[in-house]
Image (spheres, grey):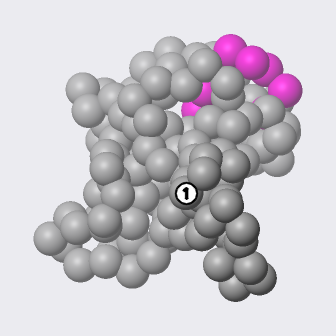
Amino acid sequence: MLCVNLLLLTCLSIVGLVSAAKPAYWVGTACSGDGVCGQANSQCYLDGCMCAIGFYYSEGSRTCLDSCTDLDTKGYYHTYPNATIKENIVYSSTEDDCLAICSKDPKCLSVEIRVDGTPCYFRYVAASVSNWEEVAGSYFFQKNCV
């Protein structure tokens, strides 16, 4: 099959030499309260699209996954404003230290930071619907998948 300039990518895709394109980066895009964000396992939270509670954002596929075996250790987190989980508090420190420590600890899955000046906390659990709570002045950070 002969492919020419503009048709090259289409041709390569048809013959299986190029994988399907990732969706555009959609996290944080504006949405209304109807919950429609156009991605599986996503939700509209505080007028911005993000992964639904209990799902991991995958940097590689730009999708929301129900489990993750390859967590990001570079310090990228999916951030939920005004949210917290209430269990398995492991460590408290300054905000910068807390995020840095969690990034280096493969067992750390999430961090909670409160804007009232209390220490932050990192946890060996991720969010799930059962332990999720909205708390004004809190930020919940969950590690992304690679």
Q: Secondary structure at mark 1?
A: helix
Q: To which residue does mark 1 refer? A: 14
Q: Quadrant of residue 69?
A: top right
- Residue 136, compared with residue 85, is above or below; it is below
Circle 1 residues within 10 Å: few <14, some 14–19, many ≥20: few
Q: Which residues are magenta?
A: 103-110
Give the number of callouts: 1
Q: Position of residue 41 (x, y in %)?
A: 31, 46
Q: Position of residue 92 (x, y in %)?
A: 70, 29
- Left or right relative to 47: residue 82: right
- Determine the residue positioned at 60% across, 51% down: 15
Q: Nearer the viewer, residue 141 or 73?
A: 73
Q: Does the segment drawn in magenta span residue 137?
A: no
- Left or right relative to 73: residue 121: left
- Determine the residue positioned at 29% across, 57% down: 43
Any part of residue 124 in sight? yes
- Residue 38, compared with residue 93, is above or below; it is below
Tag 1: amino acid:
Ile
- Look at the image and tell me in which quarter the N terminus lies: bottom right
Q: Position of residue 62 (x, y in %)?
A: 55, 53
